[in-house]
Image (tube, rainbow, N blue to C red):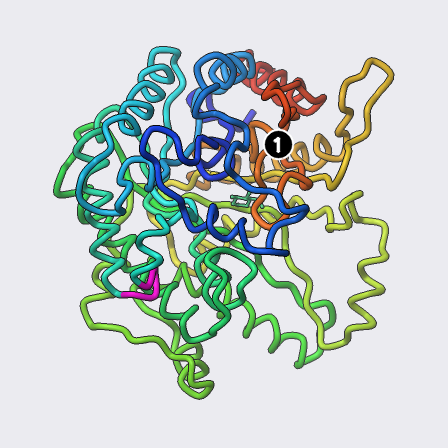
Amino acid sequence: MAFPSNFIWGVSTSAGQIEGGAYDDGRTASIWDTFAQKEGKIFGGHTPTVACDSYHRFFDRDIHNLLGLGVNSYRMSISWSRVLPNGIGQLNDKGMDYYKRVFEALNTNGISPNVTLYHWDLPQVLEEKGGWANRESIEWFGEYAHKMFSSFGDVVPMWSTINEPIATYIGYAHGAFAPGHTDEKLGNQARHNILVAHGKGVEAFRAVGPAHSKVGVVIDIWKRHALTDSPEDRALVMDQDERNWKFYCDPILAGRYSDYLLEHLEREGTLMHMEPHDFELTSQPIDFFGLNVYNRVMVSQNQQALADFSQGGNFMNNRSEYYPKAVYDAIHLLHDLYHINCPIYVTENGTYFEGDEPVGPSGMIEDDDRIRYVKGFLEWLERAVDEGFDVRGYYLWSLMDNFEWPAGYNSHFGIMSTDFENGTTTWKKSAYFYRDFINSIRNGR
Ligand code: IFM
C-alpha cells in the first residue's frame, strides 16, 4: 500500500476553460476571447464566452460534484482580467468577491483550493501593449501576483504562478494558440519573459509571506523517446527535449539555459534578449513542483517507421499511445537530471475523446479508455511513491468537459460531461471509477 492517507486527490480545471461570464461584472476580454473571434482558429467557431458557466454555477453545481467525488483538493485558476480588468491597477470588487466566495465554499467543505495565477488567459489590454513579448509583462505579472497573495494568500494553501509556459511559446511563435503570432524569436522572447515573471511571482509571494501557504510552478513534461537506436534518432530526441520541456525546467530548476540551446538559438537568429538578474528570478526556490503529464512522444527521422509504429496495438481510441509509465519516467527525470529537492504534485493527467463518447445501455457514458488510462497512470504513480519519490498528490484533468482551446468543445477531457446548452453536468463511468478509487485508498483498500 503506497499512497499515504494524507495524499492529495483532486481534479483540475482552469478559469478560461470553465468560467464563461466573459463580460460579466466588469471582466474584460482575455487573449482567448479575442482569438476565438478570429475566423478558423477554433473548432466549429466555438468561443469561451459561456463555457461551463462556472462563474454562475460553481455554487449550485461544481461544488456538489466535487463533494460527490470525495476529492480533498480542487485545482483551478484565477481569471486575470476578471480581477484586474485593465491588467494592472484597480481591482474589480465583483471579480474578487467571486473568488473569495469560491475559496470560502471550498475550505468550508474540506476541499483545499490549489490555485494557479496564470493559465494562458492574458488580459487582452496587456496583449495590446505587446503581451508576454514585452519585458514589462514581468512587472505586470508581479503586480497581479502581489495583489492576489495580499488578498487571498492565507485562504489558499497552494499557489502556482504559471501553468505550462509552452502555451505562451505556441501563441507567439506558431499561432495555433492565442494571441496567434507566428514569429519564432517573439515566441522565445515571450517564453523567456514568462519564466522570469514566474520568479517575480515567487518573489511577491515571499514578500507577502502567507503563513500557511506554499508556492510552486506547473510544467508539462512530454519526454521524447527515440524509435530506433540510430544516431540520427538519438540526436533528434536530444534536440527536441532541449526545445521543449527543458526550455522551462532548466531555468527554473537549474538557473540557466543549456549551452546547446543557447548556441542553437543564436545560430538560428532566434535568441531572445536576457538580462543577468533574470536567472536569479527564474530559479527562486519553490515549495513544490507541479507536474503535468499526459504521454511520451516518439520521434524518428524515419517517417515511415513512425507511421508504422502508430499503427501498433498500443493505442487508444483517440489515436494516442497508451504509455502510462510516462508519469514514472517524468518523476525519475526530475530527480536524475535536476536533483529536485521539493515535493512533486501531479497537477494534471487525463485523456480526451473527440466527438460523442460511447453511451452504454443505461444511458451512461462508458469511457472505458479513460478509465484504463487513469488506472495505468495511477499504478505507475504508486510505484514511484513506493520507491520513495516525494510525490504528494494527483489531480485528474478534468472535472468536466470544457473549452479545450483550439479544439473548442469537441475534445472531451472531463470525467463528467457538460451540456453546453443548459449547463448541466452528468457523471461518466470514469467519475464513478475515480470516486471509488479515492474511497478505496482512504479505506485502506
Ligand atoms: O486543457 C489543457 C489544459 O489547459 C492545460 N494542460 C493540458 C490540458 C489538455 O490539453
User: Is 107 placed left or right of 202 in the picture?
Assistant: right
User: Is 261 placed left or right of 211 in the picture?
Assistant: right
The spot of residue 127 in percent (x, y) is 35, 57
Q: Measured along the vertical axis of the image, is residue 84 above or below residue 241?
A: above
Q: Main secondary structure of the magenta part?
A: helix
The spot of residue 170 in percent (x, y) is 50, 62
**Who's the residue at 82% across and 13% down the image?**
362
Residue range corresponding to the magenta coloring: 130-134
Secondary element type, mark 1: loop
Q: Measured along the vertical axis of the image, is residue 283 above or below residue 386?
A: below
Quadrant containing the N terminus is top right
Quadrant of ligand 1: it is top right
Q: Nearer the viewer, residue 73 or 225?
A: 73
- Residue 342 visible? The answer is no
**Who's the residue at 35% across and 41% down the image?**
28
Quadrant containing the C terminus is top right
The spot of residue 397 in percent (x, y) is 56, 35
**Who's the residue at 59% across and 28% down the image?**
400
**Who's the residue at 63% across and 55% down the image?**
296
Q: Which residue is mark 1?
A: 401
- Residue type beneath disc 1: Asp
Q: Nearer the viewer, residue 329 or 2?
A: 329
Work out which residue is located at the far bottom of the displayed protein and give it: 267
- Residue 292 visible? The answer is yes
